[in-house]
Image: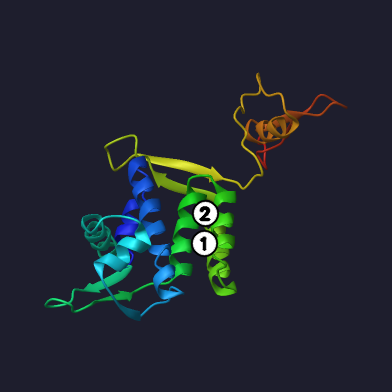
Amino acid sequence: MLSELHWLSKGRFPQLEVILLQLSEHFFNLKKLFGKLESQISQQTTLQDLGTVWNCTPRNVKWIIRRLCTAGWIAWSPGRGRGNRSKLTILTSEAEVALTLAQEATSKGRFHDGIRLLEEHKVDELTRGRFLRWLEGQYGYRVDKNENYQLDTLQLDTLRLPFYRSMPNLDPVFTLRRTEWHMARQLFDTLVTKNNEDDKIMPHVAYYLHR
């Protein structure tokens, strides 16, 4: 149902993310017409009414309708004959679209934007729970395809950790902040270490040392 939304949220084309945000705003503005956005609710309307909702010309209204239909968010049944009103059906919910936008923002590193989207649209506890379960699966060690190369065999090992701010420099030579230095120590820790009492080499990251 949200096929185009998932396609746009791949993140390979930044300009498409802007289109996605604009499209979602058009969807959310339908609350002016429906009062609430829930799946399978319908209403009779006209291009002129939608032009007022979206503040655009009838030509642009048709373009927006096509994009929303392609995304699977609405269904549109045009009225036949002069004076007959068209039928617009909501196929998803405000919470569902807000959830996907929050996931998109979080996957791009904008965690606070993701939380803000859920709060702004006042999603229910069920949707918040889905977001938290999805969030848990985004962190930790994972192997992703390296999109900088064309070969399918190249993979990218990624360790993703939640943190309240960015750490731009993890080179031990240039780290200045305590948090960055702590992370750098974890990343560049050694396999073995030297015991200061007797100068013996002891296992460290390596759990066993064969002499």
Task: Rate crowding at label 1 as few (under 14), some (14 to 19) or many (20 or more) other CA atoms within 10 Å.
Answer: few
Asked where in the image residue 194 lies, by quadrant, the reply is top right
Is 110 left, or right, of 64 in this rendering? Answer: right
Residue placed most toward the observer, 97 or 37:
37
Three-letter amino acid code at the position of disc 2: Gln
Left or right, 197 with reference to 12: right
SS under mark 2: loop
View extreme (front): residue: 83
Outermost residue toward the left? 81
Q: Residue 183: where, in percent of width, then height?
A: 67, 35
Residue 48 at what x, y percent from top left?
A: 27, 65
Towards the viewer: 199 or 69: 69
Q: Amino acid at mark 1?
A: Trp
* Quarter that holds the N terminus: bottom left
Figure quadrant of residue 93? bottom left
Direction from residue 192 to residue 108 in the image, left or right: left
Residue displayed at 38% across by 52% down: 22
Q: Would you name the residue on which mark 2 appears? A: 138
Mark 1, residue position: 134
| Number of other residues with Cα within 10 Å of mark 2, as a class: few under 14, some 14 to 19, many 20 or more | some
Residue 154, quarter of the rendered image? top left
Q: Which residue does the image show at 45% across and 53% down from the upper left? A: 104
- Relative to 85, say whether 18 is above or below: above
Q: Marks 1 and 2: in contact by CB < 8 Å? A: yes
